[in-house]
Image (cartoon, grey):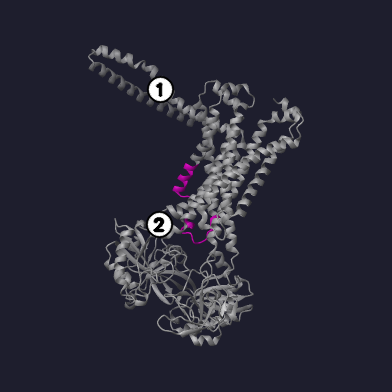
Amino acid sequence: MNQTFLRRLSLLFKRNRFRSELDEEMAFHRAQAEQDFLAAGLSPKAAHTAAGRQFGNPVHLQERSVEIINFRFETVAQDLRFALRQLRKNPGFTLVILATLALGIGACTAIFSLVNAVLLRSLPYGDPGRLVYLYTPNPRFNIPLEVFGPSYADFYDLKAENRSFQAMTAFEQSIFNLASQGTAQRVSAAQVDGDFFSTFQVSTKLGRTISSADDQLGHEKVAIISHALWQSMFASSPDVFHQSLLLDDNRYQIIGVAPSGFEYPHATDLPYGNSQYKTTQVWIPLALTARKRADRDDASGNAVGRLKPGISIAQAQAEMATIMVRLDRLHDAKTRGWGALIENFIDSTVGHVRSLMWLLFGSVGIVLLIACGNAANLLLARGASRTRELGVRVALGAGRSRILRQLLTEAILIGAAAGAVGIGLAFLFLRLLPRLDPGNIPRLNEASLDMNVLLFTVGLSLFTSISSGILPGLILSRSNVTDFLTTSRGRSEGGAHTRVQSTFVVIESALVVVLLAGAGLLIRSYINVESVDPGFSQSTVTANIGLVERYSQPQQRIDFFRNLFARLQALPGTQAVGAINDLPLSNSESLGFFQVEGYPNEKDQWAEGRSVTTQYFSAMNIPVVAGRGFVDADILHGDLVTIINQSFASKYFANRNPIGGRINTNENQIRWSTIVGVVGDVRHSSLEEAPVPQMYQPHDFSGGYIAVRSTLPPKVLANEIRSTLHAIDPNIASGDIQTMAELVSEASARRRFQTSLLTVFAGIALVLAVVGLYGVMAYSVNRRTQEMGIRMALGAQRRDVMMLVVKKAALLLALGLVSGLVVSWFVTRAIGGFLFGVGRHDPITILSVCCLLAVSGLIAAMIPARRAASVNPVEALRSE
C-alpha cells in the first residue's frame, strides 16, 4: 500500500512539474507574440488582445498537449502489452520463430567474437600499427623471404644508420629446462636485447624490464616471467623478486612479471619460428658476445622496429634497402645478394587467417539471412490468420502506421528475446570452441562476449527484428478493410502472401546451395588432405630433448643419448629407437648446398638436409627402396655417405642408378659423399605440398628429436620415456611427447577447423530452409482447403492432390537450385585458396548438393501434401 501511494505521489509531482513548465513556455511564446504586435505599431492593450486571439485558449492548449504526451506513452505501452499477449497466446509460433532467430543470432555472435578477438581487438602493445618486422631476403636461396632476419652485424649497423625508426629490437627463441624441487619442465623463452620492451611499449606488472645494462655479458642472469608462470609456479606471490629460476643449470634472478596478455612471441607470430613454441613464458637478456655481434653470416635472429610518426613502410624500406646495398658488400662473396624487406607487424600476425575469419563471418551471415527469411515467412503466415482482427482495427479508425507499428513491436519483442537466447547459444559455442582450436590462429582462445560483442548482438537483434518484420507489416497494413471484413480467411491477400513466401523460399534455397557447395568443396579437400600418405608410421612416439649446461662438450652429449637410447631400446615392446635434428611436420627446415656428379648442376643449388641416427628410418617405418640404410660404421665416416629420397633420385638421377652416385655438400671445397641408399618420400613441411628432394647424413645424436616405435600404447610409452629421462637426470625434461599421428593432425588442424564450422553452418542453413519450405506448403494447403475439397468432390484422386502440392514444392526448389548454382559459380572463387585436390566447380560436389537439397525439400513437402490428400470434401466445404 505504501509503495503504491508513493508511486502515485511521484506521478502527481511529475505531472505538476510538467504543467508548470508548460505554462512557462506558453507564457513566453505569448509574450513574444505581443512584442511582435507592439513592434508593428499596436497599442499595448490591442497588442495583448491580438496576441491572445492568435495564441488561442491557453487551458485548451494545455490539456491538448498533456493528451498528446500521454497518448504517445500510452500507445507504446499498449503495443507492448498487446504484443506480449499475442505471443503468449500462440506459444508454438513464438517458440519456433524464437528458435529460428536465436540460432542465427547466436551463430553470428559467436563468429563475430572470433573475428573481434583475432582481427579487430587491438594487440596488447603500444600503438601496434607502427610496429614492423625487418627481414634481409636473399634471392640466391630458393626459400620464403621471411626466413632470414638481419644478421646481428647488419642489425646494429641498420640501427645506427637509419632515420626511419623510433626504436629497434632483436631477439631469439629458445627452449629451456626449468628445474624446480626435483622435477623439470620445458619452458619457452625469448632472449631479448635491452630495447625489447621499450620497442613494444610494454611495462611490467611488477618489477622492471630488461635494460641495456642487463644485456651485457656478466650481468645477464636476470629474467622476467609471464603472468601465467607467475600464477602457476609462484601462486601470484608479490615477493617473487626473492625467487630465481634454474634454466639449463643457470640461475636467473627474477626482476619482473609481465602484464597479463603479453606473451610475445606466440607460436603464430613468427612465420618460421621455433616449432615447440606456444607462448613465451620467460624473457632473458640476449647478451651477445663480441664475435656474435660482429657476425654477418648468421641470420637466425628476429628483428622488430617501431616507425617514427609520419614515416610509412615504403619510406622505411627504401632507406633500409639503400643501407643494405652497402652492407651487402661486407658479406662473404659467395652469399652476397642480401636485400631489405619490411612487413607490417599486424598483417604478419593475423594476415594469414584474415581471409578465413571473413569467410566464416560471411557464411554465418548467410545463415542469419536465411533465419530472417524464415521469420518473415512465419510472420506472414500468422498475419494471414489475423486478417479479421486487423480489419476490425482498421474499421475502428486505426491507420496504416498504427497497424505497422503494432506488427513491428511484436517483431522487435521477438528479436530482443532471440538476441538474449542467442547470447546464451554463443556462450555455449565459445565453451566448445577449444575442442576445435587448431592452435595456429592467433588469439583465438581470447574470444569472449565482451562489450563490443554484446553491442554487436544488440544491433544484430534490431536488424533481424526490423528485417523480418518490416515486409509482413507493410503487406498487412496495406490491406483493404472491405476485403478483410467480407472474407473468412483473408483470401484476398492470400495470393500476395503466397507469392512473397515463395520468393523467400527460393532465395533461402539459393543461399543454402551456396553454403552447401562451399562446405562440400572444403569437405572433399579435407578428405584429400587426410588421405595423403605422409611417408612414415603415425604410431611412432616422438619427443624433443635439450640438454643442460653441464653437457656442453660434444662427447658428453653423445654419451648421454647413447645411454638414453640403450635404456629405451631395453623397454618391453620397443622395436626401434632413432633420432633426427628436425622432425617432419615440425615447422623446422634445414637447407643445404649440394652438387651431383654427372648432372648439369645450377648455381646456388639447395635441397633439404637432415642428420639422423642409424635406426631413425626403422623407428619411423620409412622404407628403404634401394640400397641400404645407415650402419654404425657410417658414423665414423661422417658426411662421406648419404641417403637420398625418391624425389631426389627422380630429379637428379633420372635414367641411371643413384646407388654409388656421388654428391658434394661442401660449398667451399669438393668433398664427395657416396649415396648408399634411397628411402621413400616424406612430407616434411606440409601435407599439402608435394615431397621435395631430401638428403640424409649419419650423425651421432647430440640433441633434437627422438623417435620410438613400440608395441606399447602411446600413453604408456610416453610415461616410460619421462621416467627413463628422469632416472638419468632429473633436471632434464622432455618436450612435446606425442605420436606422429598427432603431428599429422596438427598439420591439418586449421583445415579441419574451417571445414567443421562451415559444415555446421551449412547444416543449420539446410534445416532452416527445409523448415521454411514446409511452412510455406503447410500454409498453402491450409489456405486452399476448400479448393482441395472441391477437387476431390469432383473426382480427383489423393495422388493427384499430393502431386499438386509436391509439384509446387519442386518448382520452388528448382528455382532455388538454379539460382544458387549460378551464384555459387562466382562465389566459390572466394574459397579457391582453401581447396586441395578439387576444382572450384567440382561436378561430384555440385551433384551431391543438388540431390541433398532436393531430397530434403521434397521430404519436407510430403507432410503437407499427405495432409492435403486426406482432406474430407464434405467437411472442407462445410467449413466455408
Comes first in the chain, label 1 or label 2:
1
Which percent across, then down, holds residue 462? 49, 39
Which amino acid type corresponds to the residue marked 2 in the rendered image? Leu
Specify whether 699 is left or right of 307. right
Q: CA distance from mark 1 to mark 2?
A: 54 Å
Where is the C terminus found, in terms of image quarters?
top right
Rendering quarter of residue 122? bottom left
- Position of residue 667 relative to residue 402, above or below, is below
Q: Secondary structure at mark 1?
A: helix
Is 455 magenta? The answer is yes
Rendering quarter of residue 876? top right
Which percent across, then down, holds residue 478? 53, 27
Residue at the (39%, 25%) spot, across then down: 16
Q: Which residues are magenta?
A: 432-460
Packing grade of label 2 (10 A; few <14, some 14-19, many >=20) is some
Comparing 414 with 516, the one in front is 516
Comparing 598 with 300, the one in front is 598
Which percent across, then down, holds residue 336? 35, 73
Specify whether 243 is left or right of 721. left
Residue that numbered label 2 is attached to: 123
Mark 1–mark 2 CB contact (< 8 Å): no
Comparing 308 with 289, the one in front is 308
Which amino acid type corresponds to the residue marked 1 in the rendered image? Ser
- Position of residue 454 relative to residue 655, above or below, is above
Q: Which mark is residue 65?
A: 1
